[in-house]
Image (cartoon, grey):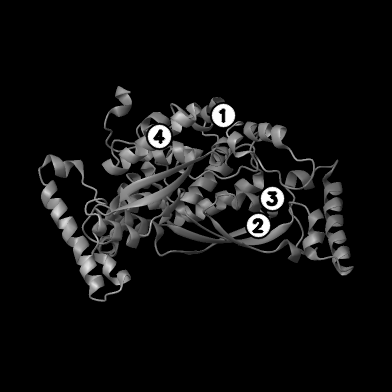
Amino acid sequence: MSDFKVELLATAGDPQLIATAGALGCFEEDSSSEILKKLLALSPEERGKKCKAVLKNSFGMGHGSVGDQGYFIFSIEDLPRAATLQLCLPEFASHLQQSLRRAKPERGFFLTENIRGNKHFGQLAVDVLSESFQFYEEMTKAGIPGEDARYLLPLYTKTNIQTALNARELCHLYAMSNKKSIPWVVRGVVDDMWDLARNAAPYLFENFGANYEQLAWYPSSQLYAESNLTMVRLIEAYGTKNNHAEMIDRSSVGGPITAETIREAVRNRNEAELANLKHVHFEFLVKMSLACFHQATRQRTWNQSVESIYDAIRAEFEKPFSRIYIPESIVKMNLALKYMALHQKMILLYKDMLQCGLPPQEAIGVAPHSLMVYNWIHVNGWNAIHAIGKRTCNKAQLEIRKIASTMAQQIKSEMPIFDGYVEPQCITYGKCPEKDSCGYHEKA
């Protein structure tokens, strides 16, 4: 019997139904709101079949944004802080946790049955942990601030926490918590969260396959990893002699990252090594259409700074066609001149509106998606492997695919150890994750 208690406080509506409507809305003319109404009009059996099929071919194929739309909020009572440390590792989960300064002897601490029942050290464990709480009380009564007195409280100190996360991050947490190096109590609480979420939204958590394993999730620190070779090397090189921070020479940040550790990260889905890749940095200045920027900005783990749209459109009407993107298909169909004329008409319309006194923030809505802006993009080593891999896929939209391919070539030129990993996703993953393969993986 677990000491902790997990409750699913709330979801954002029906998580799997909302995720399904959003996924369908990416490809249908109707809004997700209209699609949701149609789904609700179906019988429960038909609705379930529809949700299962859609989620299998979206979230189940590694399209994590679909899972982001299903949201879950948990209340967890009397959970050891050893477990809450794990819950807080994924960077896109959110938590409200009881302060350790509120720890009281009556709340107590958690011990497994194997500890409590051991005739050699069970009682000693109870005595020592009890003593730490008693000392905490003694210190606070003596006027020691709780934030200082708490240092001696054990990781098994019980606490309460409210955790909010989406389906993608719950899948992430579940995967990273079911490894042999993870404390039992962590696995226990995550399993309970998983079961409650699956009861509420079964088709968001059905086993649809590998889902790229750790590569589909933004990697988090791994407190309970069995080992972390890169961190060992980094500590050997930069280990501090005191408790203060030590700045690392940016030019040698990639030193601990080797072809060996990249291979370990990707081939064995070692999340500890995947997280290390976030400390390798590449900067790009990219000129892209507003349509392309819309795609790029949804890549939430890229750090981006974009040019003001007002500056961009001003540059376009000062120097016509300097900020226009023309798709190759338009050129091939001999429609470029007409395309350019309409683009220019929209730009001039914006200019006329300003001259008539309309505020630019109101007039800007007439600007075409063909207008190009400059985007300053920072990607890390993990982005280089996963995010650029998705964007260099033959299924990706051509403009962003060309941009991503250029970025990939420059990354491999800058750091050759990434060669073979900053590739279309089928090469990186070892298989095509798309429903309909283009055949590139088989030809490569």
Q: Which residue lies under the disc numbered 2?
A: 4
Q: Which sits in the foreground, 250 or 114? A: 250
Tag 3 near tag 2, CB within 8 Å: no
* Residue at mark 4 to residue at mark 2: CA–CA distance: 47 Å
**SS at badge 4:** helix
Q: Position of residue 331 (x, y in %)?
A: 15, 42
* Residue at mark 3 to residue at mark 4: CA–CA distance: 40 Å
* Residue at mark 3 to residue at mark 2: CA–CA distance: 13 Å
Residue 56 found in image quarter: top left
Q: Which residue lies under the disc numbered 3?
A: 82
Q: Position of residue 210 (x, y in %)?
A: 43, 37
Residue type, mark 1 in image: Thr
Residue type, mark 2 in image: Phe
Residue at the spot x=34%, y=47% of the render? 287
Q: Is residue 52 visible?
A: no
Residue type, mark 4 in image: Ala
Residue type, mark 3 in image: Ala
**Nearer to us: label 4 or label 2:** 4
Q: Earlier in the sequence, mark 3 or mark 2?
A: 2
Q: Position of residue 133 (x, y in %)?
A: 83, 59
Q: Which sits in the foreground, 25 or 361? A: 361
**Residue 261, label in figure:** 1
